[in-house]
Amino acid sequence: MYSDGPALQQLSRDECLQLMASVSMGRIIYTRQALPAVELVNFALDHGDIVIKTDSDGRLAAATRHTVVAFETDCLDAQQAGWSVTAIGPSREVTDPDDIGRLQKIDLRSWAHGTREHFVRVSPELLNGRRLRAQGHEDGNGADRF
């Protein structure tokens, strides 16, 4: 690393999950008609799994049933300091009635219009996170802001 450039730090699995839990929007990356597709979605973490709520008849729900997907979320400030987390793992629709009932009680709202009562769960097998610190971004105690 150059001494006058930003510092890049790899994050642990626990740090990745903590950062993901601090935001509610992310991007799910999947295959649609043999091409990569990206959708911006609201999500919640449930026991380390990523849960999204979608339309059961929609393209996203159909394309993410029992497939491997990627999921990315991040936070970046005006000084270009922040973090990014990418998760890769199998997706599956949630069908257990008890699980559905429990997930309906969490605060998971869709920003898209229409009824979204279908849950998709992504279980991250690979979790990769990076924190980018711009030089000189420390709080009064000498600790980094992020």
Image (cartoon, rainbow, N blue to C red):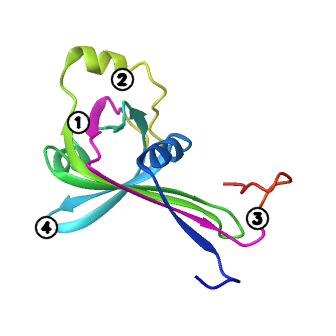
Disc 3 target residue: 137
Any mark on residue 56, and which? 1
Where does residue 48 sit, x and y in percent of width and height? 36, 36
Looking at the rendered image, the disc whose residue lies closer to the viewer, 1 or 3, is 3
Above or below 18: residue 100: above
Where does residue 4 sit, x and y in percent of width and height? 71, 83
Q: Which of 82 and 6 is in front in this view?
A: 6
Three-letter amino acid code of the residue under disc 1? Ser
Who comes first in sequence, dot 2 or dot 4?
4
Instruction: Indicate the secondary structure of the residue bearing disc 2.
Output: helix
Residue most toward the right?
A: 140
Q: Nearer the viewer, residue 80 or 55?
A: 80
- What residue is shown at x 15% (from left), y 50% (from top)? 67
Looking at the rendered image, the disc whose residue lies closer to the viewer, 3 or 2, is 3
Disc 3 and disc 4: Cα gap in Å? 43 Å
Q: Magenta span covers which residues?
A: 115-137
